[in-house]
Image (cartoon, rainbow, N blue to C red):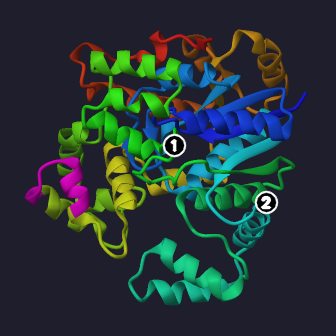
Amino acid sequence: MIVSAITSEYNPFHNGHKYHIAKTRQITEADFIISVMSGNFVQRGEPALFDKWTRTRLALENGADMVIELPAFFSCSGAEFFAGAAVSIMESCGIVNNISFGIESGTIDDIKNTGKFFSDETDEFKKLLSQYMSMGISYPSAREKAMSSLLPNIPQFSPNNILAIEYIKALCRIKSKINPVGIDRSDNGYNSLVPKKNMASATAIRQMILNGGIENTAEYVPLNAFNIMKKEYSLGNIVTKEGMSQILSYAIRTKTPKELSKILDVREGLENKIIKMDSLCSGFEKIAFAVKSKRYSLTSIQRALMHIILNVKSADMEFYKSKGFSPYIRVLGFRKNSSLLLKKLKDNSAIPVILNLKKDEAILDENGKFIIDFEKTADNIYYMCSHNPNNRGTGKDYTTPVVIA
């Protein structure tokens, strides 16, 4: 039995995602495809537009055989923690043969060489990195410059390539035997707002939807996905970062500067600027734009703000990194004809497998209970910000069943 895994967000699901799943199955000759998918918060430091149960169904109806949750504690973190947690979950499954990811330029060998380099950073690299950062440039830019000085043929440090490199780095650090597979992107790139034939990035599709043009997305998403998303959108079952503005201000104003400085990605005095801009600006996006700088990108600031909302502390993240990230595997959904996959997962997983939270929560240890409690709180915050007042209830992690397609 060959199992290939994909780290995903499907925010929202589109033709490029369907192509990636199909291409992964073809190249790896996989019997089953597992998607390790972000829950209700995504890596850009935003709430997912559609909730995790909707996105799980979209994935299952378009080629995935099982969807496993990447917990919110890790899912809106920077590339290292995001990729490290996803790879750790795949490794813990005990049945994953391949990890498939998108690449935007370069070759898979370039990605592998770069990832291996980062998994064991040399003193020379660290010295160069420190020198570039002392010039006031951002960490990603400093890292790219330092790498360019030491390694030939480095791939472009675009969003997908950065994640691909982090997947390789994570695989190397845990000495995993999972085989990495790179799939060339079919659209114009992760952040592109320009469609290419019937392919458009999730960024472009979200912009179409939020500008009130959900009908204009039909060409770029599978028909079944379009129909589901259209229905959810018409009901107001969406959440946006701007919809979290008031809770952001509440979270900032109820913490001291010292408490804010302990939040993940809030560093080097950033807490003082965040407090100042909250007093001057109104809204999540305006605060984020006001705080961003040459050193801190908009995305990194959004992650910091989201971590303030969710109360993700740097010390807690380092602790769970040292413990191998997620202490459990939570199945959000699976296909009816994938019962063998589910059985193999239960038989081979190195950590507890959760399907029914009410029933399975009791098997978690202290670390597992911390992460699942965090998930429940994060989800309650997420639904509180739904555009649909009737969708703002609590406890959906208990009342929403596993999706079976």
Mark 2 or mark 1, which has the lower sequence index? 2
Q: In this view of the protein, can residue 262 be seen by the observer?
A: no
Residue 207 — which label? none
Q: Which residues are magenta?
A: 279-289
**How much space separates mark 2 and mark 1, taking CA atoms?**
37 Å
Residue type beneath disc 2: Cys
Residue under numbered circle 1: 197
| Residue in the image at 51% along x and 54% along y | 188
- Quadrant occupied by the N terminus: top right
Whether the residues at callouts 2 and 1 have beta carbons within 8 Å, the answer is: no
- Image location of residue 79, percent across then percent down: 55, 57
Reply above or below: 391 against 55.
above
Q: Is residue 291 magenta-colored?
A: no
Q: Quadrant of residue 121?
A: bottom right
Q: Residue at x 17, y 40 (%)?
A: 246
Say which residue appears at 37% left-offset and 66% top-offset.
Answer: 297
Judged left or right of residue 267, residue 20 is right
* Numbered tag placed on residue 172 in the rendering: 2
How packed is label 2: few (under 14 Cα within 10 Å), some, or many (20 or more)?
Answer: some
Residue 207 position in % (x across, y down): 33, 42
Q: Main secondary structure of the magenta part?
A: helix
What residue is rendered at 43% in x and 38% in y? 41
Left/right placement of residue 92 relative to residue 392 reads right
Mark 1 Cα-neighbour bin, 10 Å: few <14, some 14–19, many ≥20? few
Image quadrant holding the C terminus, namely top right
